Amino acid sequence: MIKTFLIIPFLMGLTILCPPAKAWSPAPADTCEIRLIVRGDDFGMTQGSLMAFERAFKEGILTCGGMIVPGPWFEGAAELSRKNPGWCVGVHLAVIGEWMGCRWRPVLPWDQVRSIVDEDGFLFTSPSELMSHHPRLEDIKAEFKAQIELALKKGVTVRYMDIHYLNEEVFKGIPGLDTTLLAMAAHYGIPFSGNAGEQSGISLYTDPVDRKLESALKNLKELKPGLTLWVCHIGIDSPEQNAMIHTKPEDRMPEPGVGRHRASELDVLLHPDVRALIRERGIRLVNYSELQKGRR
């Protein structure tokens, strides 16, 4: 029985839970090998995300993509995933919908999960707003399970799970959420990203648009042996994506906007200098499917 966890906020949209030894862990690997998971989040959040993920999987170094099931373009993301069964696609479990004018509803009928929605049935816009309404663990668990089940129903091979925009405040304020998530991953027989043996992480989320490539190359040059998780948020420079504005002013992207920032991250994943450095350093790109096969 897992009793305690150390909860560490790690990168934008990622929380690592560090449990005792019984949790899911990958098979032992060569300790001298540098392995890198490149995980894209928010697949299906916008129409532009579909184009970005397809390019990043087919032309870039993306190894995993997390699908937003309550997102407005989930159906399009599911269709792309069915057409490309070789992609390592996960569910980016969401009970927060943070964008102004683009609200998300839960997968379940909202009156079945009243503690995680506002009076109009929309998901809350931030962890602090969620916590101020005293969310019930049972509601979060039910909604997360429904999101995975809907992805499976739509023919998506769900290969891992991770969490969208929950922080330490939420995990401390909802006793049992950490163990619930690990138990859910175990139930579906999939890794929980951030808790699958990753030792360190990379994120370009807050880097200026014109510095993201430089930052990526610096991070790659400094990678140490072991398994590293690179979390990215990719998209295209379009009116749709540039219209995405965070409800919390302190979390809004600096100029020139969400679209440009996410397009810049996509450019990094496609850049020949990034590929060349990965080859030069002998970095092995891996995904959660490979980790799972190795474990078996």
Image (cartoon, rainbow, N blue to C red):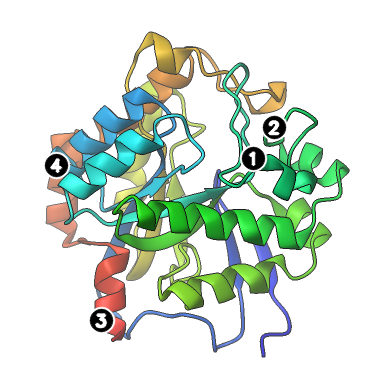
Q: Is residue 283 left or right of residue 96?
A: left
Instruction: Say few, some or many: other residues with alpha carbon within 10 Å of mark 4 (under 14 / 14 to 19 / 20 or more).
Output: few
Front in this rendered view, residue 148 or 34 = 148
Tag 1 residue: 96
Q: Earlier in the sequence, mark 2 or mark 1?
A: 1
Mark 4: amino acid: Lys
Label disc, if present, on residue 125 of the rendered structure: 2
Estimate the spatial distance between the alpha carbons at disc 2 and disc 1, rounded to whole Å: 6 Å
Estimate the spatial distance between the alpha carbons at disc 2 and disc 4, rounded to whole Å: 33 Å
Q: Earlier in the sequence, mark 4 or mark 1?
A: 4
Hey, which quadrant is residue 216 in on the image? top left
Mark 1: amino acid: Ile
Label disc, if present, on residue 294 of the rendered structure: 3
Provide the secondary structure element on which disc 2 rests: loop
Tag 4 residue: 58
Q: Residue at x 40, y 9 (%)?
A: 239
Q: Disc 3 vs disc 1: Cβ atoms closer than 8 Å?
A: no
Q: Determine whether 213 is above or below 137 in the image.
A: above
Mark 3: amino acid: Gly
